[in-house]
Amino acid sequence: ENLTFSISRDDLGSESDYVFEANLPFDASPEFRDYWSWQRSYLRVSGEERGQLLHCPGPRSPRLQRVAMMQGHRDGDAVTFCLKKWPGYVDSKHPFPFHSLNCYHSEDLEGCGCFNWTLRVDPEGYLDYEVSMAGSVGREHSRHMWVKLHRIPFSPSLNFSFPGTGKDFECDYAFRDEHQTPLASCPFAQTFQRPSRRSISAGSFQHCYNLDLKTGLVLEWDLDLQNSILKVQVSAWSNLADYVSIGFRPLGG
């Protein structure tokens, strides 16, 4: 799918911090552009927040100040960001199930067992973009998104002020972080092509949704309210997928 990702340096600030931006349109038509998701993250390179990444995915409620924080760890040519609980963090107010997955202290680096995001430039000049999350209890990490990105001659302009320091190092969903990266900087979003359609035979389930036209990813389910039973079936074209998986996450995550 069309994933664009940029790393920009904030030369207007005194410390040259960095902004990471990504658009995640997935399999959506430009007519639904207002509903496309995006991610914006702010990396501090000095001061008390040195190595900390403030993650501001959108769209979100304007009442939120922080959705996620990460701590950077450098290893040679790679840098890995792991989830970080800030002072005053309350588990019940955030969607990640640290307690139920027992993942926060499960590895040498705090938070890496729950979520880790690694960026690495390979010998051919591609950017390895690898996001892994905790799997089920007793299972290995799940590959949330592992992709190789190639460089394009476009980069977004930074026409906003970087977050403050200390308690002011937070997202601003009322203004700065309520919109996605300017589309003029993301040429793939301007040249969207709808994937070719392939027929899907109707199954025996009451509800049926074609989630992705390119891979034939279909979600079907029945809900038995009387017995509190959910029956789910997920399928995809066998020549395009090595495996098919389904997961559940808390509402609002």
Image (cartoon, rainbow, N blue to C red):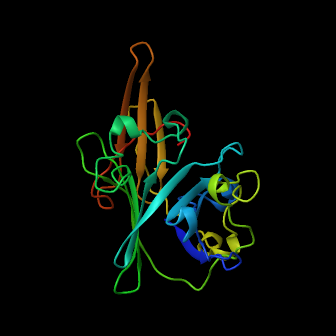
* Observer able to see residue 224: yes
Work out whether residue 93 or residue 225 is closer to the camera in this orientation and state it.
93
136 with respect to 126 (left or right): left
Residue farthest to the top, as pictured: 226
Q: Position of residue 88 (x, y in %)?
A: 55, 41
In percent of width and height, residue 96 lies at 46, 42
For the point 68% across and 44% down, the residue is 61
Give the image quarter of residue 8. Answer: bottom right
Give the total of numbered labels: 0
Q: Quadrant of residue 36?
A: bottom right
The structure residue drawn at horizontal position 43% and vertical position 24%, both measured from the top left corner, is 223
Q: Is residue 206 rendered to the left or right of residue 187?
A: left
Residue 189: where, in percent of width, then height?
A: 62, 69
For residue 10, which quarter of the picture? bottom right
Toward the front, the furthest residue is 48
Q: From the viewer's perspective, is residue 153 above or below residue 170?
A: below
Whether residue 194 appears in this view of the structure is no
> Where residue 109 appears, x then y in whole percent?
33, 57
Give 18 or 194, whichever is nearer the viewer.
18
